[in-house]
Image (tube, grey):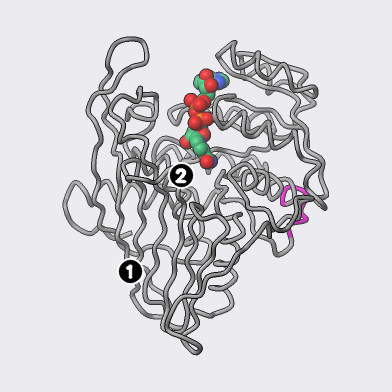
Amino acid sequence: MRVGIIGGGLMGREAASCFGRWFALADVPVRAELVAVCDLREDLLEWFAQVPTVQLRTTDHSELLAREDVDAVYVAVPHHLHEKIYCDVLAAGKDLLAEKPFGIDLAAARRIADAAKASGRFVRVSSEFPFAPGAQQAIEFVRADKLGRVLEIHSGFLHSSDLDPDKPANWKRQAATCGEIGVMGDLGMHTVHVPFRLGWKPQRVFAQLQKGYAQRPDGKGGTVECDTWDNATLTCDVEIDGQTVPMRLEQKRLAPGQTNSWYFEAIGTEGGVRYNTRDANTFFTFDNSKSPGWTREDLGHATPFPVITGGIFETGFPDLNLQMWAAYATERADQLNDRFGCATIDEAVASHELFAAALESNEKKAAVEL
Ligand SMILES: NC(=O)c1ccc[n+]([C@@H]2O[C@H](COP(=O)([O-])OP(=O)(O)OC[C@H]3O[C@@H](n4cnc5c(N)ncnc54)[C@H](O)[C@@H]3O)[C@@H](O)[C@H]2O)c1
């Protein structure tokens, strides 16, 4: 799988590092190689000069898309550019790993989805955390019907760096480039991926949205207005086995003490699971037939796509990203079988439906039906 990257910033370089250690994957049927990169910033293109497989570094994404030696393209650019660049990738006949939120708003997401389906290309959306060993165990626990009657579901993704008022703003702090959905566009796909895959789609949502600092340094000696929602707490109703179950989805940039904490928790009458990437090696379950309390288990490096890494080591974000890329390459080769796949187009559009309803709910201060 010969890959091109459009957008070589934070995430573009993370992807490059995955291809750089692809050999750590023990039995993925595809070899992945980075062959071309596009970014507007010369300093970033310079960084990619150290990647020996890269044949093209350009500031013009159409030049990258014209190349015959690019099979699949990863696009990691600001949200207002998603629709144009994703559609260009598809029109060029390339497969796509799109970054979330898959367009700046619901209308854009639906247009991209239409273009993707019409193109017949293989398209998936980035979301790494479900590939964590603890997340995989939690999914297995739920699928094995160990919860009994589901009582509540909590899923969230928490950052704290916006608590620093001196942190310079970037495009993620402005609705024009990040989207009106703000933090939900940044963190929301991560919180809904597992619940959606388990079939837990909200019927209605009550949203409480909060803004952060209205002004921040612009990094050039001045200040800039910041108008995005920083915290979003969505309380949803989900229908499971004829019962209405509360599901709380938290997306926050103002969560004290949380650096990059992705968590998932499901509690039922018979059992429960709890996992948080902040404690990457720790997995909690309870089995009510044995004890009403929680049992703690150490996980090690039990990733869904085996790697040469010793089983006793802990996982971190770059490991999960490599796992996600392994899933993308394996599913693209039609060899995923029953393993967990990347977020789908339909899941991304459904996330936008939820976030649009959340905006409406917050505006009306009322629950909104989906
Ligand atoms: N999956 C994750 O865990 C995760 C984490 C962070 C960000 N993201 C997503 O990744 C995407 C990018 O975020 P980021 O944090 O990497 O941002 P970033 O600002 O670090 O990088 C974006 C890059 O896009 C480049 N760019 C802008 N316009 C371009 C154009 N027309 N052609 C080529 N390059 C262009 C910029 O120069 C910049 O280097 C967003 O969709 C964001 O939501 C995902």
Which element is circle 2 on?
Answer: loop
For the residue carrying disc 2, how many other residues have a C-alpha within 10 Å: few (<14), some (14-19), or many (20+)? some
Q: Given the current orientation, which residue lies at the most extreme left position?
A: 365
Boundaries of the magenta span = 331-336
Residue at 65% over, 27% down = 5
Identify the disc placed on residue 260. 2
Reply above or below: 33 against 134: above
On the picture, is 173 further left or further right than 189? left
Q: Which residue is mark 1?
A: 246
Q: Is residue 335 magenta?
A: yes
Residue 193 x %, y %: 50, 55
Front residue of 107 and 212? 212
Q: Position of residue 349 (x, y in %)?
A: 46, 48
Across and down, in percent, residue 108 comes to 44, 37
Q: Is residue 336 above or below residue 138?
A: above
- Label 2, label 1: how many angstroms apart (C-alpha)? 24 Å
Q: Amino acid at mark 2?
A: Asn
Count of marks placed on residues? 2
